[in-house]
């Protein structure tokens, strides 16, 4: 049975989200329409949010986010929350697969490896936590790039050159584009010796309960056969871990 929720709190958070999402002041009539509450109820929600310092009344019936609240949000480290959620799950995943696993996010067109769980034989010895590496040639980077909007992806493909790190690295934008489309369609990414000729990786996306991309997780192997013959079983383990992490952020 699902845990019961407090409807009034949910609706007040919907009101706050509405105010935060707009660049213009939000009128109380719009709150009534979009949240589905009468005027008196909308007024109580907005008054409570204002007293809590989350919004302020620009003029009667018109509200904006509170600048002090926005400053606090700007200091908030979203990666710290992701790290706390992902690390216990990746510890279990690493033990299950017997290899090094990562959680990464896309920052300034690079993969930031915010969590790395090492097994005795560190298959990705060149990576470390909070290290940024190129995205186009890694399994985790392909998943993150595949999750971009089309315009963002095209801007990335036209923004820079793509040096070859091994003989298998894709360096032409058209080839990388095709690989990202394939990654999006199959919902997993592959590094087939593209960063290191002796390193092979699988990666899957991590999404929250609203299907928003939070990041991606990967597993690294020394033998190519480990991402070929045993691919489906290893992907099942990765997807199970991704679901556990995503579930913390609103999944069922």
Image (tube, rainbow, N blue to C red):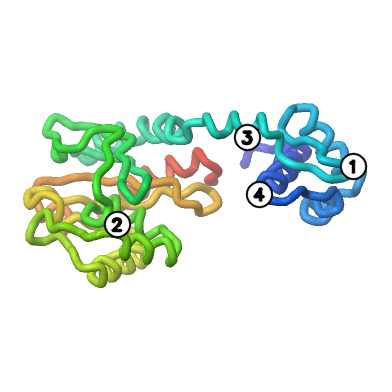
User: Which residue sits at x=64%, y=37%?
Assistant: 3
What is the C-alpha distance between the residues marked 1 and 3?
22 Å
Give the residue at mark 1.
Answer: 60
Q: Earlier in the sequence, mark 1 or mark 3?
A: 1
Q: Which of marks 3 and 2 is nearer the N terminus?
A: 3
Of the residues tagged 3 and 2, which is closer to the observer? 3
Task: Specify the quadrant that holds the N terminus.
Answer: top right
Question: From where the camera sits, is residue 231 visible?
Answer: no
Which secondary structure lies at badge 2?
helix
Compare residues 211 and 171 and report the one nearer the observer.
171
Question: From where the camera sits, is residue 161 visible?
Answer: yes
Asked whether, in this view, residue 235 is left or right of residue 63, the answer is left
- 151 is higher (above) or lower (below) than 211: below
Compare residues 93 and 198 and report the one nearer the observer.
198
Give the residue at mark 4.
Answer: 21
Q: How packed is label 3: few (under 14 Cα within 10 Å), some, or many (20 or more)?
A: some
Q: Which of marks 3 and 4 is nearer the N terminus?
A: 4
Residue 13: percent from left, percent from top? 70, 40
Give the residue at mark 3.
Answer: 70
Residue 243: percent from left, percent from top? 43, 46
Q: Which of marks 4 and 1 is nearer the N terminus?
A: 4
Q: How packed is label 2: few (under 14 Cα within 10 Å), some, or many (20 or more)?
A: many
Asked whether, in this view, residue 4 is left or right of residue 165, the answer is right
């Amino acid at each position: 049975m699902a845990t019961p929720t407090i409807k009034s709190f949910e609706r007040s958070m919907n009101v706050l989200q509405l105010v935060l999402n707009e660049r213009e002041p939000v009128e109380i009539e719009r709150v009534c329409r979009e949240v589905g509450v009468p005027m008196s109820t909308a007024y109580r929600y907005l008054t409570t949010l204002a007293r809590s310092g989350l919004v302020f009344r620009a003029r009667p019936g018109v509200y904006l986010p509170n600048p002090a609240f926005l400053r606090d949000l700007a200091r908030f480290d979203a990666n710290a929350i992701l790290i706390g959620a992902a690390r216990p799950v990746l510890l279990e995943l690493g033990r299950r697969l017997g290899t090094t696993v990562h959680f990464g996010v896309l920052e300034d067109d690079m993969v930031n490896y915010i969590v790395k769980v090492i097994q005795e034989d560190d298959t990705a010895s060149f990576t470390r936590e909070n290290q940024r590496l190129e995205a186009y040639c890694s399994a985790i980077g392909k998943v993150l790039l595949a999750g971009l909007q089309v315009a963002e992806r095209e801007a990335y493909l036209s923004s820079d050159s793509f040096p070859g790190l091994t003989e298998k690295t894709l360096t032409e934008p058209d080839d990388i584009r095709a690989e990202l489309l394939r990654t999006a369609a199959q919902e997993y990414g592959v590094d087939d010796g593209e960063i290191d000729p002796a390193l092979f990786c699988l990666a899957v996306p991590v999404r929250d309960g609203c299907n928003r991309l939070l990041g991606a997780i990967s597993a690294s192997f020394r033998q190519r056969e480990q991402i070929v013959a045993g691919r489906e079983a290893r992907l099942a383990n990765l997807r199970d871990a991704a679901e556990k992490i995503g579930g913390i952020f609103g999944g069922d």
